[in-house]
Image (cartoon, helix red, strand yellow):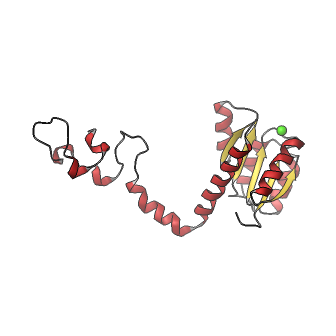
Amino acid sequence: MTKDARALVVEDELPVRDLLRLHLELAGFEVEESGDGREALRRLRESAYNLVILDVMLPGLDGVSLCRAIRTGGPNLSTPILMLTARDTESDKVLGLESGADDYLTKPFGIRELIARVNAITRRHARDDDPAPARKRTSAANVQLDPEPRGGLRSSAVARPRAAWPRVPGRRGWWERDRCGGPACRSR
Ligand code: CA
């Protein structure tokens, strides 16, 4: 985190706001606070931030509407937004994310999880801003390992017809290890 990274905390509960300020400052942010949705929107239209923490239930303007307003234009069009709310139903989470938030955390939250999520969304944002790594990622996207252990490789390199795979005589369904390698091949 660079020293001049600015965060805006939009939260109407003072104890939560104080807690957020303390830990975001420890994480290296210069923190500004707002307890009102409309006042926050005014600030967000005037200057750019590196991070916005956004409570959903706010006086003035609710967090979802505020998030949508941020994403329609202005200096914080692509600023990472972490949404906080007491609601935890799936539709609330989907609504938050669809309104343009980068991540979503349900109250009460652990401060370590919050900081981990802040770090993740700001890292992702920094990568997206850098065109060189983005190009590398695109070219590597064709050879990603599947996170599912038996899901196999997504690479086009292993997408050849099954008939073309060498077979060990006398062992049905068990393909030669040396030619394909790894559990993905053996499971076929
Ligand atoms: Ca609130």
In front: 26, or 2?
A: 26
Identify the residue at image location x=67%, y=30%.
89
Quarter in which the C terminus is drawn: top left
Identify the residue at image location x=65%, y=32%.
91
In front: 60, or 104?
A: 104
- Residue 19 left/right relative to 119: right
Quarter in which the N terminus is drawn: bottom right
User: For the image shown, how many numbered marks are present on the structure?
Assistant: 0
Where is residue 136 shown, x and y percent of the image?
46, 65
**In the current view of this chain or complex, which residue is farthest to the top?**
89
**In the current view of this chain or complex, which residue is farthest to the left?**
169
Among the 4 quarters of the image, the one containing residue 32: bottom right
- Would you place residue 13 above or below residue 79 in this image? above
Q: Quadrant of ligand 1?
A: top right
In front: 36, or 8?
A: 8
Among the 4 quarters of the image, the one containing residue 75: bottom right
In front: 124, or 40?
A: 124
Where is residue 167 shown, x and y percent of the image?
14, 43
Identify the residue at image location x=36%, y=49%.
154
Where is residue 183 shown, x and y percent of the image?
31, 43
